[in-house]
Amino acid sequence: MVPLTANFINRVQQYGGGNGYGGGNNNNNNVFVDYGVYKTKGALKIKCVRPTFETDAGGRKIMKRAGGVLFELASSTAPRAYDWGNKGSFMLSGTEAAELADRMAANAPCSFFHDPGAGGANRGAVNKGFKTEPMPDGSGGLFVNLSTTSAGNKSFHSVPVSYGESAAIRHVLVYLVPRVLGFDEVFLPQ
């Protein structure tokens, strides 16, 4: 076990302690963190999207919009180079993130479908399918797949994720679920 130095502890308190978004308890919105998996044929990044809040006339803080967990996938263009300009993105709600974490723990497949224009004039214009499936070799790893159809054009991204990487993703998801749903705000100092 590596001993924690005073310098490390100060950095954690300054930049990463507290509410899970960085910045300790000062709600610093200028801290950005992602988790990436980089493979030969593609890469993925996971990012947290904070919920938004507003203050009502009585001074109460009320959640305006829940956050989510954003998955971004890109194909490789060369060794250690990825086409992030043509990435695919899919944001999981807190409920979807919780389901994905549980299915990953059970080594079970999981899939979600989103139509960003649902309920409006653009319904069906863009369709996104996000799917994870266990590797057939029984290694505990999984494939993360994202298919997008937009204006008749189809794109597909697939990234193999090792057992260790899938465990890290699952732990990140479990940690983020109450935060993207806004529950951590209840416990912040006034």
Image (cartoon, rainbow, N blue to C red):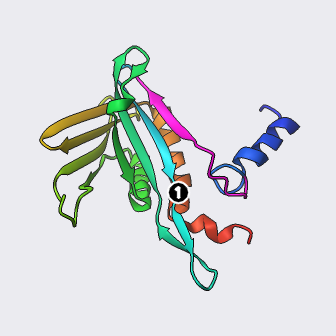
**101 with respect to 174 (left or right):** left
Image vertical order of residue 184 relative to residue 176, above or below = below
- Can you tell which quarter of the image residue 58 is in? bottom right
Is residue 85 or residue 165 the one in the foreground? 85
Is residue 33 or residue 170 the one in the foreground? 33
**Residue under the image location 38 percent in, 44 percent down:** 107
Q: Main secondary structure of the magenta part?
A: loop
Q: Is residue 78 magenta?
A: no
Residue 176 can be seen in this image:
yes
Secondary structure beneath dot 1 equals loop
Residue wearing tag 1:
50
**Residue under the image location 17 percent in, 63 percent down:** 121
Q: Residues within 10 Å of mark 1 (few under 14, many from 20)?
A: some
Residue range highlighted in magenta: 24-39
**Residue under the image location 48 percent in, 70 percent down:** 64
Q: Report the quarter where the C terminus lies.
A: bottom right
Q: Report the quarter where the N terminus lies.
A: top right
Residue 147, given in percent of the width and then of the height, sits at: 24, 40
Residue 123, given in percent of the width and then of the height, sits at: 18, 59
Residue 103, given in percent of the width and then of the height, sits at: 38, 51
Residue 171, given in percent of the width and then of the height, sits at: 53, 47
- Give amino acid for label 1: Arg
**70 with respect to 186 (left or right):** left
Image vertical order of residue 105 relative to residue 135, above or below = below
Residue 5 can be seen in this image:
no
Image vertical order of residue 57 relative to residue 170, above or below = below
Q: Is residue 32 magenta?
A: yes
